[in-house]
Amino acid sequence: MPKFHLPHLSPSTGWNTLTRTHISVLKLFLLYAVPLSVLPPLMLYYAGITYGGSLLPALSSTRLQLIGAVFFLCELAMTFLVAYIVQRLTEWVVDSKPAFEDAYKMAVVVPTPLWLASLFLAIPNFMLIVTAIAAALILSATLIYYTVPAFLKIEDKGQASILFGLILAIGMVAWALMLYLTLLTWNYLVPVIAPL
């Protein structure tokens, strides 16, 4: 039987390659963050129209569009806010200020599993959706663990661990804030703007 020899790739190899590649913040925003940020609002709209009333509250198309638009804008704003906070935290913990481009790379790569988990809204199964979101949160935490040393250029494991914990906490707060703003829209803004 023939043997295949594959190159040994560690998780950090991919991050190091991405770190060395110069990608402008604008390009990352337009070609990565925007397309992936569209997924959750689109899937929420699809789920609301397709099986609203059973798994999700029944809402009109206009209300779903408004909620999706607010969530989409929150997602995009959070990528920049999280990148700024990551840059400042790194400066505070490691006494080294990474380029905003590197912090932004991290801010858009880490939530990728959460963006993709929204695809599970196509299946009207509550437990499957909750499981997908839980798995996405674990994968995002794993991405933070591997991207901190690579993107932020931190060699000390102790400092990387402290920064990992802080960024994980900030990411959870950002995610909760986006959900909160969406719920505020749902409860207060939607009835005023789209009463039908």
Image (cartoon, grey):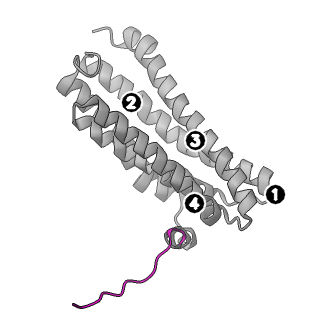
Q: CA distance from mark 1 to mark 2?
A: 38 Å
Sequence order check, earlier mark of 1 and 3:
1
Q: Which element type, helix, strand or loop, lies under badge 3? A: helix
Disc 1 target residue: 95
Sequence order check, earlier mark of 1 and 2:
2
Labelled disc at residue 147: 4
Amino acid under disc 2: Ala
Which of these two is toward me, 92 or 32? 92
Labelled disc at residue 67: none
Labelled disc at residue 69: 2
Q: CA distance from mark 1 to mark 4?
A: 18 Å
Near mark 4 (Cα within 10 A), the count class, few <14, some 14-19 or many ≥20, is: many
- Measured as percent of width and height from the top left, residue 39 is found at 33, 42
Disc 3 target residue: 171
Which residue is farthest left?
50
The magenta span reads 1-12
Q: Does the magenta portion include 185?
A: no
Amino acid under disc 3: Gly
Left/right of residue 60 with respect to residue 148 in the rendered view? left
Amino acid under disc 1: Asp
Which residue appears at 52% of the width and 65% of the height?
A: 23
